[in-house]
Image (tube, rainbow, N blue to C red):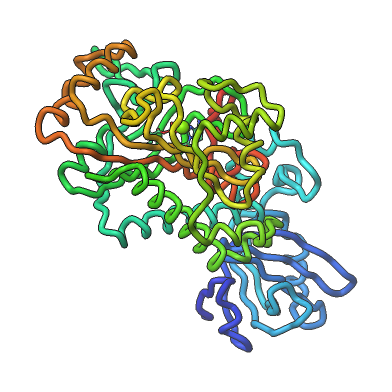
């Protein structure tokens, strides 16, 4: 029996008889010829069946294949310049593993479907070429980000998902029953990263985080994945550099390893090309506000940048832009103040080009015990839940800084997606909890 070959490797088997296992993507009929297209997760291959060359029952069996029927196919690999991919499979036999019934066909057809229909069928929609390409790029982005930190001697230390208190403001907390108590789904692993940084120096965590975002924007998910480095004795400049190097590394990886996926997505690589190189442009918040006002934004000094502001600003630059030194009042309780201007935070947001919004948020952490206690009180956070965090300021307090990069926003930008919902296999949003 011929051995099973991945479609992506068929070119190494020219002239050989092979087996392919997968699904029927499409079927075209042209007189005495059948052109089924098979996919197996590694690629697509066009099959050819010549009526006169196979037993009548094989021809009929191929002819009756319905879309997404699972199959085992046998055939000979032939080079053919006209075939997509340069090779085709001269089919000699086919076995339907599960035939999709003619009267209950696969719901996603080549015709146009509305986004809600596709989202309801997300479990099937993932099989399409476009979603397949996004899955491949997601894999590459995650692998690249992990390699980046692993190669720089960061130790991965996982943070918990059930937590006793808020990290990023109390308005977006998901509360869950925890036996006779309450717990919250984590908004960020940062606080735990800070403990880990004191243990290993340079650390990162990578996992799902949760925000009860009531906003229905193209950038917000309620469950998303964040990679978060934290570095002992680092300052703002150190993590700005780390952030831009990370993003440049990820973009470089995708450009060099996933050009085919970008092509499937009709994403022009020239738009990403400049982002392979550091440094990225920098702006202080004061100047960002001036630029925005000159472009017609309503923003006043002291306010946070809105989604529209981020889009306006990002359109000024071909690369991601780093905005630093926001007013402390719009940032989280743990942000260290700028010693020169204490009303400002030593923080950084990185905004992706083309209006994809903030991809990185981070800064220097408050290392001072008294000031941190004051901030916890001002923010009406439950002091008891933060005692362990305060210990980090009681026992060998140290300057440190870090950031979080939202994986889906990065994928959305790199893939040029209209909405972040396509950048995660099964998106969770205000109005979507299924499939
Ligand atoms: O700016 P954020 O809220 O920062 C933190 O959580 C810090 N504690 C991270 C740290 O310093 N270790 O979130 C970080 C990033 C944002 O820049 C954005 O990319 C992404 O997470 N993000 C979201 N992505 C999708 N949907 C949402 N609702 C998001 N909220 C934040
Ligand atoms: Mg932020």
Q: Residue furthest bottom?
A: 15
Q: Is residue 112 visible?
A: yes
Q: Residue furthest front?
A: 340
Q: Residue at x 62, y 75 (%)?
A: 74
Q: Residue at x 74, y 60 (%)?
A: 26
Picture quadrant of residue 209 = top left
Q: Is residue 268 above or below residue 115?
A: below
Observer-nearest residue: 283 or 174? 283
Q: Quadrant of the C terminus?
A: top right
Q: Is residue 28 left or right of residue 218?
A: right
Q: Is residue 213 left or right of residue 399?
A: right
Residue 265 percent across, percent down from the top left = 68, 55
Q: Is residue 80 above or below residue 427?
A: below
Q: Residue at x 58, y 22 (%)?
A: 215
Picture quadrant of residue 383 = top left
Observer-nearest residue: 165 or 41? 165
Residue 149 percent across, percent down from the top left = 33, 55
Residue 87 percent across, percent down from the top left = 68, 79
Q: Residue furthest left?
A: 395
Q: Is residue 279 left or right of residue 27?
A: left
Residue 305 percent across, percent down from the top left = 56, 28
Picture quadrant of residue 352 = top right
């Amino acid at each position: 029996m011929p051995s099973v070959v991945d479609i992506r490797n068929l070119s190494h088997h020219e002239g050989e008889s092979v087996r392919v296992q997968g699904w029927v993507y499409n079927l075209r009929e042209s007189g005495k010829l059948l052109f089924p297209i098979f996919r197996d997760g590694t690629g697509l291959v066009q099959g050819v069946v010549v009526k006169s060359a196979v037993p009548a029952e094989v021809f009929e069996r191929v002819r009756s294949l319905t879309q997404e029927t699972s199959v085992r196919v046998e055939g000979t690999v032939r080079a053919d310049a006209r075939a997509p991919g340069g090779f085709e499979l001269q089919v000699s036999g086919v076995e339907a593993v599960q035939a999709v019934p003619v009267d209950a066909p696969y719901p996603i057809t080549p015709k146009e479907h509305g986004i809600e229909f596709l989202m309801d069928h997300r479990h099937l929609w993932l099989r399409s070429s476009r979603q397949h390409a996004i899955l491949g790029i997601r894999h590459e982005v995650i692998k690249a980000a992990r390699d980046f930190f692993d190669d720089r001697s960061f130790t991965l230390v996982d943070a918990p998902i059930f937590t006793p208190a808020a990290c990023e403001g109390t308005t977006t907390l998901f509360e869950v029953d925890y036996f006779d108590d309450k717990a919250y789904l984590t908004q960020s692993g940062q606080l735990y990263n800070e403990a880990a940084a004191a243990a290993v120096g340079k650390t990162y965590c990578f996992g799902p985080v949760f925000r009860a975002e009531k906003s229905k924007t193209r950038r917000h998910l309620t469950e998303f994945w964040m990679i978060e480095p934290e570095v002992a004795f680092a300052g703002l400049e150190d993590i700005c550099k780390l952030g831009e190097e990370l993003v440049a590394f990820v973009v470089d990886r995708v450009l060099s390893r996933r050009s085919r996926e970008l092509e499937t997505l009709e994403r022009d690589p020239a738009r990403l090309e400049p982002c392979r190189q550091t440094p990225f442009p920098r702006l202080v918040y004061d100047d960002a506000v001036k630029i925005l006002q000159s472009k017609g934004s309503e923003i006043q000094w002291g306010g946070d940048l809105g989604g529209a502001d981020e889009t306006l600003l990002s359109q000024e630059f071909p690369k991601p832009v780093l905005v630093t030194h926001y007013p402390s009042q719009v940032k989280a309780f743990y942000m260290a103040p700028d010693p020169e201007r204490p009303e400002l935070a030593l923080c950084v947001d990185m905004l992706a080009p083309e209006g994809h919004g903030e991809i990185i948020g981070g800064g220097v952490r408050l290392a001072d015990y008294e000031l941190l206690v004051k901030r916890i009180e001002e923010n009406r956070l439950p002091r008891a839940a933060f005692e362990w965090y305060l210990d980090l300021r009681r026992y060998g307090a140290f300057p440190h800084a870090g950031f979080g990069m939202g994986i889906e926003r990065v994928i959305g930008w790199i893939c040029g997606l209209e909405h972040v919902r396509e950048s995660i296999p099964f998106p969770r949003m205000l109005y979507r909890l299924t499939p």
